[in-house]
Image (cartoon, helix red, strand yellow):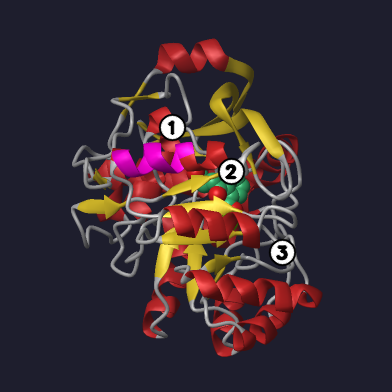
């Protein structure tokens, strides 16, 4: 297989509700879609970078530049035996995994379509017919608002609630949520808002039998997480700091976490996501699929990823309507009353693209090759 054309599109989509983490509040997304063509077949990927370099070093404009100037030239016209060849072709680029991963995932989609199989089969997934789903609920303006959101998501059937925390919105809020909802699967995500100096404060969270605490410490730290994990009963789940297979190996070796959140973009695509999945499985570390407020393509790719066998915990992959008044795929992603998403059997990522809508919300487009 050989790519002869890459189209980059930046789309702008307002969120139905703002999403607040410890690092920022997002009202609207600017998302890069990557369309790759070769041998008469087309595949699609989505870049998961945010609008600002606050979750990691990437943002929409940096991802566009990296794709345009560095990723596309390394892949266009090169003979590819499979989508596995994309990661090594872009490995000379340091970091910028989300930009590289957006294109890599598009090539997996293309390869699946070429073989006429669903993406989940192409990546070696398919361990389950239905993907268990949780929701990630951002920091709210009041605890009452948070209660309301949790009620709505539980009524919809979601299997676990993740609440975002930051200094000033942590132990007391988690306590109130736990008192109000004593039996739910609950976890907290700090997005690197704390340091080891907060150890005693974070230990108070042990009282609330959380499933896990996600990324409490530095976005680039593994060693301090190992120190903290030794002092906490609650398992630590690592997100930001697992960018490579080596990071996952080191975190496991140092006992820095009990659980890993795998995000397709953060680890540069499916080939590395699968390897992180495999080494975690071999070490007895469960994984789940994280989210980056994706539009339909990224969401569909996450569903495929979450069908690998060690994705045993509910992920942050949820229904389109929680994010968008209209998604870019048809049908939109829906969740069953038991909080699962059924994977689909169509070739590729499994949903049709709403190209008219994509055209209408495109704010930048460039054809390469
Ligand atoms: O840390 O998991 C995170 C969104 C943006 C950036 C980082 C994170 C998140 C989420 C949202 O938690 C997950 C989703 O619903 O897509
Ligand atoms: Mg996280």
- Which contiguous range is marked in magenta? 148-155
Image location (x, y in percent) of residue 30: 63, 28
Residue 314 or 307: which is nearer the viewer? 314
Q: Is residue 27 above or below residue 186?
A: above
Q: Which residue is mark 3?
A: 219
Q: Is residue 315 visible?
A: yes
Is most of the magenta stretch helix, strand or loop?
helix
Q: Which residue is mark 2?
A: 143
Q: Is residue 358 above or below residue 26?
A: above
Q: Quadrant of the C terminus?
A: top right
Image location (x, y in percent) of residue 80: 45, 53
Image location (x, y in percent) of residue 39: 37, 36
Q: CA distance from mark 2 to mark 1?
A: 20 Å
The crowding category of the residue bearing disc 3, from other C-alpha atoms within 10 Å (few below 14, some 14 to 19, many at least 20), is: some
| Mark 2 residue CB less than 8 A from any atom of ligand 1 | no
Q: Is residue 167 above or below residue 208?
A: above
């Amino acid at each position: 297989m050989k790519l002869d054309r890459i189209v980059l599109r930046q789309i702008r989509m307002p969120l139905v509700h703002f999403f607040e983490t410890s690092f920022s509040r997002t009202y609207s997304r600017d998302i890069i879609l990557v369309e790759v063509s070769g041998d008469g077949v087309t595949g699609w990927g989505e870049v998961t970078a945010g609008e600002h370099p606050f979750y990691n070093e990437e943002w929409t404009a940096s991802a566009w530049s990296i794709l345009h100037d560095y990723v596309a030239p390394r892949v266009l016209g090169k003979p590819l035996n499979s989508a596995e060849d994309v990661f090594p072709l872009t490995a000379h680029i340091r970091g910028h995994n989300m930009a590289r991963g957006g294109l890599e995932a598009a090539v997996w989609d293309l390869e699946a379509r070429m073989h006429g199989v669903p993406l989940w089969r192409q990546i070696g997934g398919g361990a389950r017919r239905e993907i268990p789903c949780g929701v990630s609920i951002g920091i709210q303006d009041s605890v009452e608002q948070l209660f309301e959101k949790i009620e709505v998501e539980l009524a919809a059937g979601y299997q676990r609630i993740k609440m975002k925390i930051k200094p000033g919105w942590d132990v007391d809020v988690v306590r109130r949520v736990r008192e109000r909802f004593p039996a739910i699967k609950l976890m907290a995500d700090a997005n690197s808002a704390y340091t080891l100096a907060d150890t005693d404060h974070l230990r108070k969270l042990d009282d609330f039998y959380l499933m896990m605490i996600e990324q409490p410490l530095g976005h680039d730290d593994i060693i301090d997480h190992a120190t903290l994990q030794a002092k906490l009963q609650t398992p630590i789940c690592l997100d930001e700091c697992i960018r490579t297979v080596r990071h996952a190996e080191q975190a496991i070796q140092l006992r820095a976490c009990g659980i890993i959140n795998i995000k397709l973009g953060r680890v540069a695509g499916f080939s590395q996501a699968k390897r992180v999945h495999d080494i975690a499985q071999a070490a007895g570390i469960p994984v789940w699929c994280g989210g980056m407020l994706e539009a339909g393509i990224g969401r569909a790719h996450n569903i495929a990823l979450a069908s690998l066998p060690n994705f045993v915990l509910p992920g942050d992959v949820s229904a389109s309507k929680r994010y968008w008044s209209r998604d870019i795929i048809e049908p939109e992603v829906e969740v069953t009353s038991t909080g699962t998403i059924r994977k689909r059997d169509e070739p590729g990522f499994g949903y049709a693209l709403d190209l008219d809508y994509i055209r209408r919300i495109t704010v930048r487009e460039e054809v390469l090759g």
